[in-house]
Amino acid sequence: MNPLDLVQLGALMTRTSGTSGIKIGLIDGPVALDHPALASENIRQLGEGNAGCRAHPLACVHGTAVAGILSGRRGSPAPAICPDCTLLLRPIFATPGAAGHEMPSASPRELARALDDCLAARPHVINISAALVRSALHDEPSLEAALGRAARDGVIVVAAAGNQGTLGSTTITRHPWVLPVVAYNIKGRPMGYSNLGRSIGSRGLGAPGDWIRTLGPEGQSIGVGGTSAAAPFVTGTIALLLSEFPRARATDIRRVLTPNRISQRTTLVPPLLNATAAYDAMRSQL
């Protein structure tokens, strides 16, 4: 099955490729903007760009892959969910000591700064596919405060749940404003390494995260997986819904994406995203 079919995203993508007025903040590794299959004319830098790719090549692989899922050109190997939306890049880099340096990561304080930089550019949704490095407890309130500012501003925050195969939560996934995302395989089952927990199950969503074909930094296509690949499917769906329904509020979008949230959900495992159902619900409400 096509990953887009798994979450019923094809019909919405046929309706729209997004609009430039809808802005997505991407907190991830640097992105190779010279990739020919990337809609780079709709991408704005909020931080270091291709120079970051040279200094942090593995983080660049990650950032370019996630950017391709969102902003690849239609017809490219990538899912290319919303290439006509504006993508705001706020790169972070592999933190020294992070396992393998394969995934962009940040301390809570660094991630809070990245969130604030994105919020200053007035996005509609922010995608966090980066890892949170454990640090001193006094760093945690800065991240909680930044997430609170996103909620106050009505900016939806979508975050990868993590790939450690644990039960529990982080400062990000337990925040009530965040939509955590779990990786599902092509058969519609959660991947065994996805983190799960009460907050993830009650407020989150599942999305494709099993060998997703997307863009690599050297002009090639690559396959990636995990919750960091799944998160942009949710983010891209939100961007397309906002493109179709520009008067919708963040609370409207959250309601149609997770209609059975809070008290009605007691599972640790979130349901799969259904983009068509969300579109139909939004159309009936507005």
Image (cartoon, helix red, strand yellow):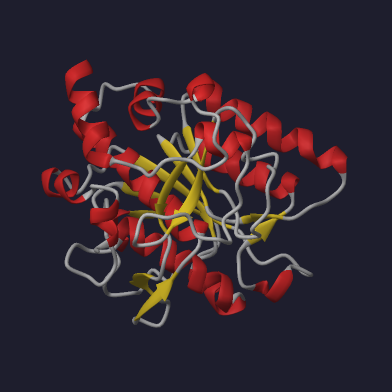
**Residue at 67 percent of width and 73 percent of height:** 101
- Asked if residue 77 is positioned above or below residue 218 in the image, the reply reads above
For residue 177, side relative to residue 21 (left or right): right
Q: Is residue 161 visible in this depiction of the protein? A: yes
Quarter of the image with the C terminus in it? top left
Name the residue nearer the viewer: 206 or 48: 206
- Asked if residue 261 is positioned above or below residue 161 in the image, the reply reads above
- Asked if residue 39 is positioned above or below residue 61 in the image, the reply reads above
Residue 72 percent coordinates (x, y): 29, 63
Marks counted in the figure total 0
Name the residue nearer the viewer: 205 or 20: 205
Name the residue nearer the viewer: 115 or 159: 159
Residue 3 percent coordinates (x, y): 29, 60
Residue 99 percent coordinates (x, y): 72, 71
Q: Is residue 286 visible in this depiction of the protein? A: no
**Residue at 36 percent of width and 72 percent of height:** 215
For residue 203, side relative to residue 7 (left or right): right
For residue 105, side relative to residue 203 (left or right): right
Toward the left, the furthest residue is 15
Toward the top, the furthest residue is 285
**Residue at 35 percent of width and 74 percent of height:** 34
Quarter of the image with the N terminus in it? bottom left
Residue 194 percent coordinates (x, y): 56, 56
